[in-house]
Amino acid sequence: MNKYIYIIIISIFIFSCTSNTILKKPENLMSKDKMVDVLTDMFIASSAENIKNLDLKRKVNYYPLVFEKHKIDSALFQESNYYYTSKVDEYDEILNKVEERLKELTKLYEYEKKIEDSILKAEQKLQPKLKDLKGKKTIK
């Protein structure tokens, strides 16, 4: 008997959590592509919050820089984000594109880091040879 009561309670809870509310489209809604761009930068800004910047500061709020870069304000972002979250399928599509872009950026960063590391290794190997060349007398 308790088993059926639990199933009924869980079913009621699940159905009450789903919302069929789809908001009216705002007049100045950002396009999906623009949302992908902004959300990608927002995720990067969020991740960078706990990393020391060039001034060795942490907990820097980079969100205003994201808004400035995309020439939007926080109200426009909030309206658009709120609208797209009410349309779950569209928002899921946007988030999938953001995830793909973040993966591409991660691959690009790793590749650039690998190149930088290989250049440093090559310089370290050449350093003793350069010292030897500087130490030898040149014939004139």
Image: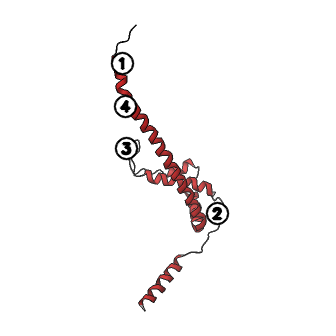
Residue 56's disc is 3
Check disc 1 and report the residue beneath it.
134
Task: Please say which color scheme the image uses.
Answer: secondary structure
Give residue 27's position: percent from left, percent from top: 66, 61
What kind of element bears circle 4? helix
- Marks 2,4: beta carbons within 8 A: no
Query: As shown in the figure, which amino acid type bears the numbered disc 4?
Result: Gln
Residue at position x 58%, y 60% in the image:
94
Residue at x 43%, y 88% (from the top left corner): 3
Q: Amino acid at mark 3?
A: Leu
Q: Residues within 10 Å of mark 4 (few under 14, many from 20)?
A: few
Residue at x 34% of width, y 26% of height: 128
Decide if residue 26 is on the left or right side of residue 7: right
Q: Is residue 51 above or below residue 135?
A: below
Cα separation between marks 4 and 3: 27 Å
Residue behind mark 4 = 124
Label 1, label 4: how far apart the Cα atoms are: 16 Å
Q: Earlier in the sequence, mark 3 or mark 2?
A: 2
Can you identify the residue that label 2 sits on? 26
Choose the circle earlier in sequence order: 2 or 4.
Answer: 2
Q: Is residue 98 left or right of residue 119?
A: right
Q: Determine the CA span between mark 1 and mark 3.
A: 38 Å
Q: Quadrant of the C terminus?
A: top left
